[in-house]
Image: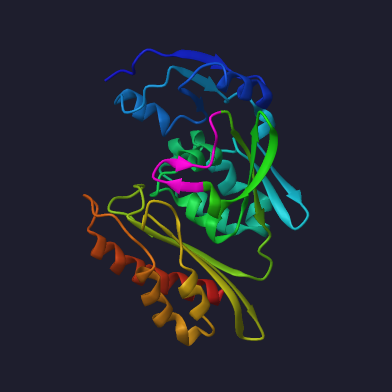
Amino acid sequence: MIPAPFDYEVADSVEHAVELLGERDDTKLLAGGHSLIPLMRLRFARPAVLVDLGRLSSLRYVRDAGEQLAIGALTRHHDLNHDPLLQEHCPLVSHAAGLIGDPQVRHRGTIGGSLAHADPASDLPAVLVALDAELLLRGPDGERALPAGDFFRGVFETALGPQDVLTEIRVPKLGPRGWSYLKFTRRAQDWATVGVAAVVRRSNGTIQDAAIALTNMGATPVRARTAEEGLRTADDIGTVAEAVAAESDPPSDTSGSADYRRYLATVLARRALAEAISR
């Protein structure tokens, strides 16, 4: 199929994009296009106007920001996967980006586009929720910061207002913390049937704290906070993994039933926690 008719604008700055978003109803931003264009071809999405952000090179970067790394929203998955700053200070993001789709997708898709699309099966949203990342949004009233956990509101729904542009993602430097992201897919390079992101901080052989977030186990990335509180030693992994699935509300679809997903989440959580603790 071909998309319904639409107008096309090219933004020459973030401010210009905000302005264009306010000129007409049903205006959509275009970043890498790997999520929006297929929906338009199927006519599930029929925007009246597309505002192309692709020429805003100012939103394509990874920078050292003290205790955090700042990532421009138009940074492509391939660049995240190979960025030396991320590999050194926050390898969880680098690793997860390398698991997304195939090389063609990774060379075109952007981190901001993936987050704004808010597909529950996407890898990076759960990773950023586990990291307690911070997202910067620019709108007609200026810039505001939002925790990643508050950004996702439902299936394909976010906290972005009609004139908001996601400009930057800030992730912590992990330092000595261990990490893991594991996912199960029915086919190579497919969406995650289930994914588990884990971050663990240890001191003197004792687990100080942990963060666990799940992919495709609910309408938004699921933070398994009750399970996190139960992780005190490596001996607790089995019990904690069982608790992870109980905190979710997974869908049933052609990739698997809700019960199947709960089983997968338990298995993957056990493996991810063991891997994070061993790092």
Residue 104 in the image, given as x and y percentages of width and height: 44, 35
Quick one: which residue is furthest to the right in this view? 66
Residue 94 in the image, given as x and y percentages of width and height: 57, 52
- Say which residue appears at 46% left-offset and 67% top-offset: 224
- Say which residue appears at 36% left-offset and 53% top-offset: 192
The residue range painted magenta reads 152-162
Answer above or below: position of 227 versus 218: below
Residue 121 at least partly seen: yes
Residue 98 at least partly seen: no
Looking at the figure, which quarter contains the N terminus? top left
> Seen in the image, is 186 located left or right of residue 100?
left
- Based on the picture, tell me whether residue 42 belongs to the magenta stretch: no
Quick one: which residue is furthest to the front in this view? 141
Residue 76 in the image, given as x and y percentages of width and height: 56, 38
Q: How is the image coloured?
A: rainbow
> Seen in the image, is 21 located left or right of residue 249?
right
Residue 239: quarter of image: bottom left
- Say which residue appears at 62% left-offset and 86% top-offset: 205
Residue 128 in the image, given as x and y percentages of width and height: 55, 54
Question: How many numbered marks are there?
Answer: 0
- Based on the picture, tell me whether residue 154 belongs to the magenta stretch: yes
Residue 246: quarter of image: bottom left
Answer above or below: position of 190 versus 162: below
Q: 68 or 159, which is in the foreground?
A: 159
Looking at the figure, which quarter contains the C terminus? bottom right
